[in-house]
Image (tube, rainbow, N blue to C red):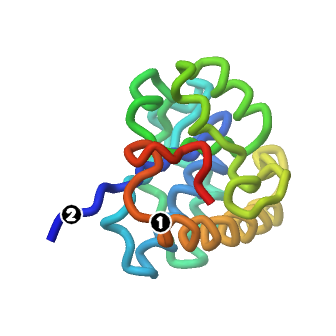
Amino acid sequence: MTEQPRTAILFVCLGNICRSPLAEGIFRSVVAERGLEDRFEIDSAALGDWHVGHAPDPRSVAVARRYDIDISSQRGRQVGPADFARFDLIFGMDRENVRRLCRIAPPEARKRIHLFLDYALGRKEEVPDPYYEGEDSFAAIYWTIREASEALAARLAERPGSARRSGQASSIT
C-alpha cells in the first residue's frame, strides 16, 4: 500500500501566542479524534518577531487545557521563506495577516494563502485577536476555531493527496 502524502498546514497570526497556536492545537486534536493525524503536518507561526521562542499566552493555554488540549510546549516562531515552499495551505487568522502573507510570499505560493474562516466555513469573517480582551474572548475564539477546524478536517479528509502536490491548491472544494 502506498503511503498517502501529508497535507502541510500552517496557521498564522500576528504574534503566534494567541490565535495561531490555539488553531494548531485544536486542529491537531480534531484530526486525532478522526484518526487522521498521519495525513497532516500542522504548525503555526507569527508575522512579527517579538514573541519568537515564547510559550503561548496563558489564556490560550488555559482555554485549550479546559478541553484537554495541551499547547503549552509550543513556542512562537516567525514565518520564514521556507514556509512558503513547505506548506500546502497557509491560513491567516485575519485579513491583515493574509495581506501581509501575500506581500512576503513568492508569487507561486500566494494561491495557498487563505483567510481561515473563509476557507474552512465559507464565511468572510476573521478570527478576532483576543490579546487585549478578557478570558471570555479566548473562550469565544476557541469555539470559532473548533467549528472551523471540524469543517476543515472534514473537507480535507474527502480529498486524496495534498493540495500543492496534486496541483489543486487554488480550487480545493
- The residue located at (74%, 27%) in the rendering is 99
Please state the horizontal and vertical placement of residue 134, each as a whole percent of the image.
Answer: 83, 57
Disc 2 marks which residue?
Answer: 3
Residue type of the residue flagged with mark 2: Glu
- The residue located at (63%, 35%) in the rendering is 15
Location of residue 94 by image quarter: top right
Please state the horizontal and vertical placement of residue 35, each as a whole percent of the image.
Answer: 37, 79
Q: Is residue 59 above or below residue 15?
A: below
Q: Is residue 32 above or below residue 119?
A: below
Q: Is residue 14 above or below residue 31?
A: above
Please state the horizontal and vertical placement of residue 137, each as a whole percent of the image.
Answer: 81, 60
- The residue located at (67%, 34%) in the rendering is 14
Q: Please tell me which residue lies in front, 69 or 114.
A: 114
Q: Could you tell me how far apart the alpha carbons at marks 2 and 1 are, in whole angstroms?
A: 15 Å
Q: Which mark is residue 159?
A: 1
Determine whether label 2 and label 1 are within 8 Å by CB.
no
Q: Please tell me which residue lies in front, 48 or 4.
A: 4
Q: Quadrant of the N terminus?
A: bottom left
